[in-house]
Image (cartoon, helix red, strand yellow):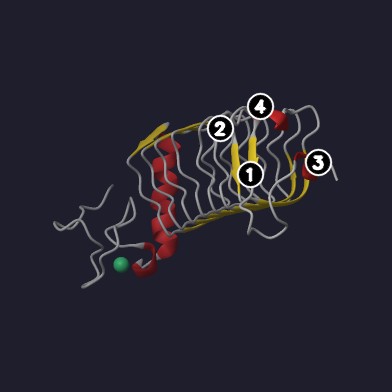
Amino acid sequence: MTEAMPENGCCATPRCERMPLSESEHCYQHLPDEQAWRRRLEAVLSQLRELDGYNLSGAGLSKLDLSGKRLHQCRFSGAVLSDCNLDHTRWLLCLFDDARLTGCTVREAVVHASIIAGAEIIDTDFTGSDLVQSNFNGTYVAHSSFADCDLARSRFIAARLEHTSFVNCNLKDVLLIDTAYTDLDFRLSNPEDARFERSNDAPGGPFRHENLYP
Ligand SMILES: [Zn+2]
């Protein structure tokens, strides 16, 4: 079922140096038949509970159901996920850097040692997830929910957070340094245990704790 990977490990299109997608010998930009690739992908997903070393970097993924999968060393770098279901997934060493998640659900997931840096996360629901020590640096997050999440030791450095729920979260040792935020809901959480800092020259000046409770 899986097509052989070209010997140099790159996309089969000449001079393309991107990694081929899993279930293809091409990168997403050079897929000769995207629908056929999607059908192969879904056939494999229906059989596998664990995806190891899967590469979906840069792929447009709409309404993909990954619920309940174990994702081990999987790459979604720069992927565009819309209305995807990642509920009850377990991530270990996964890359979602520069990915775009819109209308996705990642509820009651367990996310460990994974990188979500630079991602755009809009209208996405992480309710009830274990996101300990995750890297959200440089993300833009809007209209999303981290309610009931454990975010201990996660980093949101230089992120922009808007209209997002952090209700009933564990924020122990979360780093929010030079993070811009608007309309965040920290009810029942412990923002006093997070580290909020702003450089003196950041817009709005250095962070003061009362900034949290406008
Ligand atoms: Zn290519």
Kindly identify the amino acid type of the residue bearing the numbered disc 2: Leu
Can you identify the residue that label 3 sits on?
210
Instruction: Give the camera-side residue of 108 and 213.
Output: 213
Kindly identify the amino acid type of the residue bearing the numbered disc 1: Glu
In the image, taking residue 109 as reference, residue 32 lies left or right, namely left
Q: Quadrant of ligand 1?
A: bottom left
Can you identify the residue that label 2 sits on?
131
Q: CA distance from mark 4 to mark 3?
A: 19 Å
Q: Are marks 1 and 3 in contact (CB under 8 Å)?
A: no
Ranked by sequence position, the earlier of labels 1 and 3 is 1
Can you identify the residue that label 1 sits on?
197
Q: Nearer the viewer, mark 2 or mark 1?
A: 1
Kindly identify the amino acid type of the residue bearing the numbered disc 4: Asn
Can you identify the residue that label 4 sits on?
170
- Residue 135: give x, y in percent of width and height: 50, 42
Q: CA distance from mark 2 to mark 4?
A: 10 Å
Ranked by sequence position, the earlier of labels 2 and 4 is 2
Q: Which of the 4 quarters of the picture holds residue 170?
A: top right
Residue drawn at 71 percent across, 41 percent down: 145
Q: Residue furthest left?
A: 7
Q: Which of the 4 quarters of the picture holds residue 37?
A: bottom left
Can you see residue 34? Answer: yes
- Residue 10: give x, y in percent of width and height: 23, 60
Residue drawn at 66 percent across, 28 percent down: 193
Instruction: Give the camera-side residue of 184 and 210.
Output: 210
Q: Nearer the viewer, mark 4 or mark 1?
A: 1
Instruction: Give the camera-side residue of 114 and 15.
Output: 114
Q: Nearer the viewer, mark 2 or mark 4?
A: 4
Q: Secondary structure at mark 3?
A: helix
Q: CA distance from mark 1 to mark 3?
A: 12 Å
